[in-house]
Structure formats: C-alpha cells, structure tokens
Image (cartoon, rainbow, N blue to C red):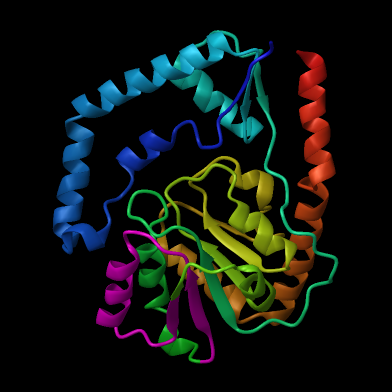
Amino acid sequence: MKLISALHFDPASFIKCYYADVSILIFRSRVVCQIILYLKKVFKFWFMRQMKESSNLNNLLYRESDAVILLSERFKPAFQKITGLPKISKLHAIGNSLTYSVQEEVCPKKKQILLVGRMDFYQKRPERFVQIWSNLEDKYPNWNVLFLGDGPAKLKTENFAKRLGLKNIRFKGFADPKDAYRESSILCMTSTFEGLPMVLLEAMQFGTVPVAFESFESLHDIITDGVTGYIIEPFDLKQYANRLESLMTDENKRIQMAQKAQKHVTEKFDIETIISHWIEIFEKI
C-alpha cells in the first residue's frame, strides 16, 4: 500500500511564531512586549529543542511516506532546511481547491472591510488590525469593519477596540461568511503565518480584494501585489494602513483588482484543476 502524507500548514510556522512580535493584549505594555521579544531571541534553548523535534518528526514522515504533499512549491525550501534532507524528490505541492461554486460577476459592494477566522494571539492576531483601523476610522466614517469568527482572543480584542473608542467595528462571532464575502469590498488578514488560507481564496471568488502580510510563502500563489490584492511587509502596520487607505479611496482600483482576483483564483484553484494534480501524484508513485 502506498502512503501519502499531507502537511496543511507552513513548515516553518513555529519558527515564525517564536520570532514574531508579542501581542499587546497579552502584556498591555509595549515596553514589556519588546523586552519579551528580545529575551526570546537571546535565550533560544526551548526553541532549539522544538526545532530538533520538528526536524526529527518531518524526517520520519518523509522516510515513511511514498510522497509528502505541501500546500505550495514555495514551502519546499523551508521543509528541506528544517529536515536537513539532501534530496526532496518525494516532496510535492498541491494547493487547496475552491469550496464555493460562484457563477456571478463582481457585484456592487458595501464600504465594508471583512476579517474572517479563528481569533487567537498565536497565529491570527486580530488585534493588529484593530491597531491599523484606529488610524483610519475617523478619516472614513462611512466605512465599517466586520469580524467573523470566535476564539480565545475575541473578548480581549473587542475590549481593545472599545478602549480605543472605535465605533464602526463589529464582532459577529462564528457565522457563515458567504454573504459577507458577497457584500464586502476588502478582505484583511493579519496572521503571523498561514498554510494556504481558504479565507483569501473564498473572498477573491466573490470579488473581495485581499490585503495580507507577507508572512507565509504561499501568499504569492494567491496574490499578485498591486494586481489582485496587496502584500504588506510583515508586520508594518503603517504600510498596511497606507495601502488599505489607497484601496478605500479609489473605487475604480477596487473594481479592477476585484475582477482580476476573481479570475485568478477561479482558474488556478478550481476543483478539477486540483484533482488533476492529485491524480498525477497517484500515477507517479
């Protein structure tokens, strides 16, 4: 019997989390956050142990499998570096397929910014967007923000928005995002890492323009910067706000990018296309 293993995450996710900035909502002091980040970089004993465990696990997975599937070709260098494998011929890449069947063209949108996903301080980091929005809300009172999702960071993120006096921001909790994709103009993501996030693919299907940090390599499979969305240097909140503002103030640009985004994901991540990649792997091994 042939064995195929699939890794549906960024192989370097734990490394990125370890070196990422610390959430302001955990310690509530920027100075303390900076000190914690500095100490993590200086004292790396725990990190090195985790690195070795990850390397051993991935090596075992590679040895025992006839094929190992990553979500993107761009994740291969990280996998090889972590494992130290001289050859990676059994390593392949197949992305996620689209889940919705969308036949409609890009429809008229509300002046709404959407965030969808689990709310936590480890990966998704919703408080980053609250900080970004705090610099824009007063300038654009006719725009609003909608958070869909739940998790351990939800209550603290809501309270953070209240402390900053933000009014045009709603936290709806867990809900089917389909209607929100259809209505929203922009989809924002502020994650420390991702695999190949369905949220971006689904939003783009409905012509919602994505903005995300360049914190995971597969993002370049999804977004062409300035064409189908915006890619922001991690974790530059000022640049994020500037690029977001440029979208909010230019409706023609949003429409053009929305149309290109919809066309791109529909062609590249169609389920028949993804199935053909799997069949190719089956036949190869």
The N terminus sits in image quarter: top right
Q: Residue at x 49, y 59 (%)?
A: 117
Residue 78 in the image, given as x and y percentages of width and height = 50, 27
| Residue range (magenta) | 142-171
Is residue 179 found left or right of 133 in the rendered image?
right
Residue 253 in the image, given as x and y percentages of width and height = 71, 74
Q: Nearer the viewer, residue 186 or 66?
A: 66
Residue 224 in the image, given as x and y percentages of width and height = 68, 52
Is residue 92 found left or right of 43 in the rendered image?
right
Q: Is residue 163 magenta?
A: yes
Q: Residue at x 50, y 36 (%)?
A: 10
Is residue 52 found left or right of 248 in the rendered image?
left
Residue 121 in the image, given as x and y percentages of width and height = 32, 54
Q: Quadrant of residue 70?
A: top right
Q: Residue at x 41, y 88 (%)?
A: 138
Q: Residue at x 34, y 19 (%)?
A: 53
The C terminus sits in image quarter: top right
State the count of labels: 0
Q: Nearer the viewer, residue 130 or 276?
A: 276
Q: Nearer the viewer, residue 97 or 82?
A: 97
